[in-house]
């Protein structure tokens, strides 16, 4: 649907959903080994074991075989469709609440609000997904428990809901990083497209926005914008991600657990490892930003183009 009928260019919502999910899965599969390395570097249980990304890659692949690098990938893949649906839906809702018309170009401040808000709401899903993933990634055995086994163990605990949603507040704070992510993405593309992309489209739809910007700015700037957005989005809240890993890798809700609360985790982490603890795992996170975004955009645009 184009400008000829006076309405913004639209993509079928089913194609939106399928393309977003397929792109998300592609990004997860490409980036998961570096995510596993990130979690190992952040976890107090593996303190001092790995000296660098290559060393972690070598040790994990030798001791746990190559599949050890993809431990825990099932839970994020199972959750990617729901997380994308929430992010897309809440982003659109918040953007429509701020714009007079969906086709009005939003300010960077409005993009930040929509992005950060969508991340906070999506944390209701991403927190338990991350918990299950991290439990598997932090298990060094050759035969770690399956995703279903971890979930059954959690649900059979004395406080299943509290256990499953352990780390929810800090996950919500971390996921405000969607705000700087979307701002960086949009700001970068605006340096290459000095006028609104044509045809006119809805700025309340993330897939429609991404598709229009690829057609307007081209693949190179779009991939560059995605890579920079991934770097900035993660860097903006990364210390919170370190603490989230420490909180979710420890068991029990007892008061004696120093990682029971956000403030307690921050104090304990700083006491044991110093200020550098808050950037542990940052290197693999930044390295994976580019290949993850390339894979995501290639698959996303491939699905959109194939089903248009």
Image (spheres, rainbow, N blue to C red):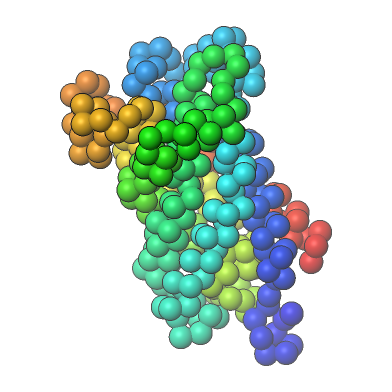
Q: Position of residue 46 (x, y in %)?
A: 39, 17
Q: Position of residue 49 (x, y in %)?
A: 40, 12
- Residue at 47% from the left image edge and 55% from the top image edge: 122
User: With respect to residue 84, does 285 lie above or below?
Assistant: above
Q: Position of residue 39 (x, y in %)?
A: 44, 28
In this rendering, does residue 221 appear at all?
A: no
User: With respect to residue 181, does 268 lie above or below?
Assistant: above
Of residues 275 and 214, the one drawn nearer to the viewer in this rendering: 275
The picture quadrant where one finds residue 183 is bottom left
**Number of numbered callouts drawn:** 0
Q: Position of residue 283 (x, y in %)?
A: 43, 30
- Residue at 53% from the left image edge and 80% from the top image edge: 102
Left or right, 20 with respect to 53, comes to: right
Left or right, 60 with respect to 280, comes to: right
Kindly give the residue lying farthest to the right in the view shown. Answer: 306
Of residues 285 and 220, the one drawn nearer to the viewer in this rendering: 285
Left or right, 12 with respect to 94, comes to: right
> If the image is split into quadrants, where does the C terminus sit?
bottom right
């Amino acid at each position: 649907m184009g400008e000829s009928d006076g309405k913004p260019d639209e993509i079928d919502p089913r194609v939106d959903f399928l393309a977003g999910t397929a792109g998300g899965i592609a990004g997860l599969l490409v980036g998961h080994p570096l995510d596993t390395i990130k979690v190992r570097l952040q976890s107090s249980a593996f303190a001092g074991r790995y000296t660098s990304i290559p060393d972690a890659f070598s040790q994990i692949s030798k001791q746990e075989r190559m599949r050890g690098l993809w431990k825990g990938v099932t839970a994020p893949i199972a959750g990617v469709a729901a997380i994308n649906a929430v992010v897309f839906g809440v982003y659109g809702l918040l953007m429509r609440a701020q714009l007079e018309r969906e086709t009005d170009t939003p300010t960077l401040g409005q993009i930040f609000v929509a992005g950060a808000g969508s991340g906070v709401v999506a944390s209701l899903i991403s927190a338990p997904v991350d918990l299950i993933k991290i439990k598997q990634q932090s298990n060094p055995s050759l035969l770690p428990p399956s995703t279903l086994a971890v979930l059954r163990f959690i649900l059979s605990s004395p406080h299943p809901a509290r256990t499953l949603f352990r780390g929810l507040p800090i996950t919500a704070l971390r996921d405000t990083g969607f705000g700087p992510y979307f701002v960086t993405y949009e700001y970068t593309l605006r340096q290459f497209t000095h006028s609104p992309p044509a045809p006119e489209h809805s700025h309340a739809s993330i897939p429609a926005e991404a598709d229009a910007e690829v057609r307007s700015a081209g693949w190179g700037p779009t991939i560059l914008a995605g890579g920079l957005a991934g770097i900035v989005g993660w860097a903006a809240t990364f210390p919170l991600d370190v603490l989230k890993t420490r909180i979710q890798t420890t068991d029990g809700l007892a008061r004696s657990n120093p990682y029971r609360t956000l403030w307690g985790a921050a104090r304990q982490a700083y006491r044991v490892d110093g200020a550098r603890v808050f950037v542990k795992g940052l290197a693999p996170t930044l390295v994976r930003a580019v290949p993850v975004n390339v894979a995501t955009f290639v698959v996303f645009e491939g699905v959109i183009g194939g089903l248009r």
